[in-house]
């Protein structure tokens, strides 16, 4: 009787294992095929992304990769195959899961060698390009120095170019008729060291050497012009078709004599010496003082004293504040007398 029970139990277990095996034989291939389909969809999306990103980079390649145009073409091909070949290997791995398709060994070896060759070539071009950013150079160009017909210098937006959508890449630069356009030109207001206005264009760039960096900076065109008492500042810099993108940037430094004034237009990006960053400099007329830019009406009314440097000592803070208040009051009297 015990033997019959054991045989019955073994039969039940055998049937259960056969049932589970039958289910797994149907479910596992289904799961593998579902995973393969999902993987193929993801691979297709990655391939589309590779093509899209590569096509977006292509117009900028000759302006970024060092060397002649042939190097930029080679570098772009390196990037393409370095990304494509791994996708091919993964695709055939998924195909093997789906229906057992295998990539021939000779083709696999050829693709592997081609991938290593592209990686080596791309690394050489990448290192050579990276060296072009090792040093920084600065070049200053004096646009104006002297007296104006008026005590007020008006700063307004000059030529303007807005960034188009879906056409930017390195540092938000874009191409316009083959030329490189960099957005953003800052206007920096500081105190003049004498009794004259000084307007200076400050250009910066990177290069393989300091000398080359300065040459790159020198090639940045003029971004501002003075017409009477009006200073017009462009909101972009433009590089020639033959130039390379090397972190070029430009700013306009305006040195204002003590007691002279500037009026800043609404669309001008200005940086000036004021501790209170909450005040918007645009659309107002400011007077240069020993403590930076002040606005007599606003600063006196709101007890904002411009860029006042205080010491940790409470008595020192009071003294500095009194001096600044007195200076503002004197400027208010001077302005009222000038208006009369």
Image: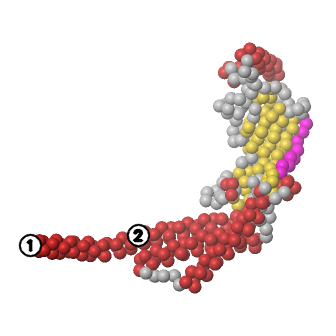
Q: Residue at x 36, y 70 (%)?
A: 31
Q: Quadrant of the C terminus?
A: top right
The residue lying toward the viewer, choosing from 31 and 199, is 31
Residue matched to label 1: 1
Q: Is residue 142 in the magenta section?
A: yes
Instruction: For marks 1 and 2, give the CA distance.
Output: 50 Å
- Mainly helix, strand or loop, the magenta region? strand
Q: Residue at x 84, y 49 (%)?
A: 138
Q: Is residue 109 left or right of residue 35?
A: right
Residue extent of the magenta highlight: 137-147
Q: Quadrant of the N terminus?
A: bottom left
Q: Coloring scheme of the render?
A: secondary structure
Q: Is residue 167 in the magenta section?
A: no
Dot label at residue 63: none
Q: At which x and y percent is residue 282?
A: 70, 35
Q: Quadrant of residue 207?
A: bottom right
Sequence-first tag of 1 and 2: 1
Residue matched to label 2: 35
Seen in the picture, residue 170 relative to 2 is either above or below; the reply is above
């Amino acid at each position: 009787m015990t033997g019959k029970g054991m045989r019955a139990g073994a039969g039940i277990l055998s049937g259960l294992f056969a049932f589970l095996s039958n289910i797994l034989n149907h479910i596992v291939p289904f799961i593998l095929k579902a995973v393969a389909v999902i993987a193929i969809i993801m691979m297709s999306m990655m391939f589309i992304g590779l093509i899209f990103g590569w096509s977006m980079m292509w117009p900028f390649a000759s302006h970024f990769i060092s060397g002649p145009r042939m190097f930029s073409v080679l570098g772009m091909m390196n990037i393409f195959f370095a990304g494509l070949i791994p996708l091919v290997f993964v695709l055939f791995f998924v195909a093997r899961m789906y229906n057992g398709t295998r990539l021939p060994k000779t083709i696999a070896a050829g693709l592997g060698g081609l991938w290593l060759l592209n990686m080596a070539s791309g690394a050489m071009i990448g290192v050579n390009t990276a060296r072009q950013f090792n040093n920084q150079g600065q070049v200053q160009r004096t646009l104006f120095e002297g007296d104006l017909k008026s005590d007020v210098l008006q700063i307004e937006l000059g030529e303007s170019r807005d960034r188009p959508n879906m056409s930017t890449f390195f540092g938000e630069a874009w191409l316009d008729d083959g030329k490189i356009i960099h957005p953003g030109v800052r206007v920096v207001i500081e105190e003049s060291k004498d009794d004259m206005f000084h307007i200076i264009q400050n250009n910066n760039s990177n290069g393989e050497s300091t000398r080359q960096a300065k040459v790159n900076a020198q090639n940045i065109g003029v971004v501002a012009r003075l017409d009477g008492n009006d200073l017009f500042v462009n909101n972009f810099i433009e590089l020639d078709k033959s130039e390379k993108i090397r972190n070029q940037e430009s700013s306009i430094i305006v040195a204002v004599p003590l007691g002279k004034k500037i009026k800043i237009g609404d669309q001008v990006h200005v940086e000036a010496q004021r501790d209170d960053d909450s005040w918007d400099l645009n659309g107002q007329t400011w007077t240069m003082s020993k403590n930076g830019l002040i606005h007599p009406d606003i600063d006196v009314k709101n007890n904002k004293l411009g860029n006042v440097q205080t010491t940790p000592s409470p008595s020192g803070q009071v003294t500095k504040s009194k001096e600044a208040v007195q200076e503002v009051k004197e400027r208010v009297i001077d302005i009222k007398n000038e208006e009369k």
